Image (cartoon, helix red, strand yellow):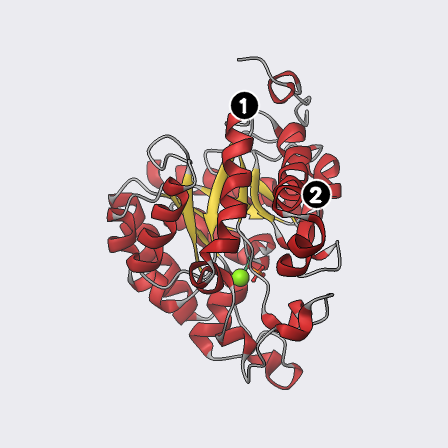
Amino acid sequence: EQTDAVETVRPENPVKPMTATEVKVNVSIPEAGERAAATGADGVGLLRMEHMILSTNKTPERYIEDHGEDAYVEEIVDGVRGVADEFYPRPVRVRTLDAPTDEFRQMEGGESEPHEHNPMLGYRGIRRSLDRPEFFKHELEAFRRLFEMGYDNVEVMFPLVNDAEDVVRARNLMAEAGVDPEKRSWGVMVETPSAALSIEEMAEAGIDFASFGTNDLTQYTLAVDRNNEHVADRFDELHPSVLRLIGDTIETCREYDVATSICGQAGSKPEMVRFLVNEGVSSISANIDAVRDVQHEVKRKEQKLLLDSIR
Ligand code: PEP
Ligand code: MG
């Protein structure tokens, strides 16, 4: 089938080094899609849905009240489409909504958000989505429409899952919404120690990929609030405990043929890049400004591993 998605192919970055490990890019706002695509990245490792909703300055509930369900779905479709066009046929991994209640509270309609002592430990990501399937289903409907339009480069990613039960429930809702988990690429963020420790069961639930959200994985592994300046010096994505969870998860994923990736900030750090390539990660997603450096760091590490293996 012919769609505008199929017609948009961008020229590759001519000096991009060839690497076995893919290097992708994170996109927080759809408007950055063109700049992100021009990096020559192998795809988008994380496209956050938050901005598409929060830029309207309304909570999803208020947006739907004011404009209706269809407009809400189209808001998401439009946001994803812009980026999916820029990258086609390179894959674009879209994460379902993950905003904590304190962020939603600043929006119109935010007064009905629950007050939480620890929003980062609370009602966000897949927890909120599974608790409110009547809202989550609109996000899934957006994916259904995108696939129907021919955007077969779009992938579905669920944030803040803890275990296989979260994954199965999300997968079933996706299937109910008309997105076939057998046909589409879908997966999870590994952002909690529990998710890392449940990776085998999640693999059995059929995920195609697992992506390390090291901002949260570090916060939850070390019990260090990522937004608390008083403990900021303890926030260390390269802490041995974080690296052990990541390394073990990659090893299990390789056994199950589940692709692995990183889309947290640490993916832009050279030490983390070297660690991940050594562990055999499938892809690394970096910030737009770091893509070039990460491509070269990956290349150097791969060459070193090759040399070490034949010496
Ligand atoms: C992460 O936790 O590393 C991540 C990429 O998600 P966010 O920063 O949006 O929580
Ligand atoms: Mg996160």
| SS class, disc 2 | helix
Residue 153: in sight, yes or no?
no
The percent coordinates of residue 74 (x first, y second) are 65, 39
Q: Residues within 10 Å of mark 2 (few under 14, many from 20)?
A: many
Classify 244 as above or below 204: below
State whether residue 303 is above or below residue 266: above
At horizontal 75% and vertical 54% (from top left) the residue drawn is 56
Classify 10 Å Cα crowding around label 1: few (below 14), some (14-19), many (20 and above).
some
Q: Marks 1 and 2: CB-CB under 8 Å?
A: no
What is the residue that sits farthest to the top in this orientation?
A: 2
Query: Which sits earlier in the primary sequence, circle 1 or circle 2?
Result: 2
Choose top left, top right, bottom left or bottom right for residue 6: top right
Tell me if I can see residue 218 in this picture: yes
Q: Which residue is mark 2?
A: 30
Q: Examine the image and state in which quarter residue 97 appears.
A: bottom right
Q: Position of residue 261 (x, y in %)?
A: 46, 47
Nearer to us: label 1 or label 2: 1
User: Observer-nearest residue: 217 or 178?
Assistant: 178
| Foreground of the two, 227 or 117 | 117
* Disc 1 residue type (three-letter): Gly
Which residue corresponds to the image point at 71% horizontal and 60% vertical from the top-left? 58
Where is residue 141? Give x, y as percent. 51, 40
Picture disc at residue 150: 1
Horizontal side of residue 148 vs 38, given as left or right: left
Which residue occupies the foreground of this view, 272 or 34? 34
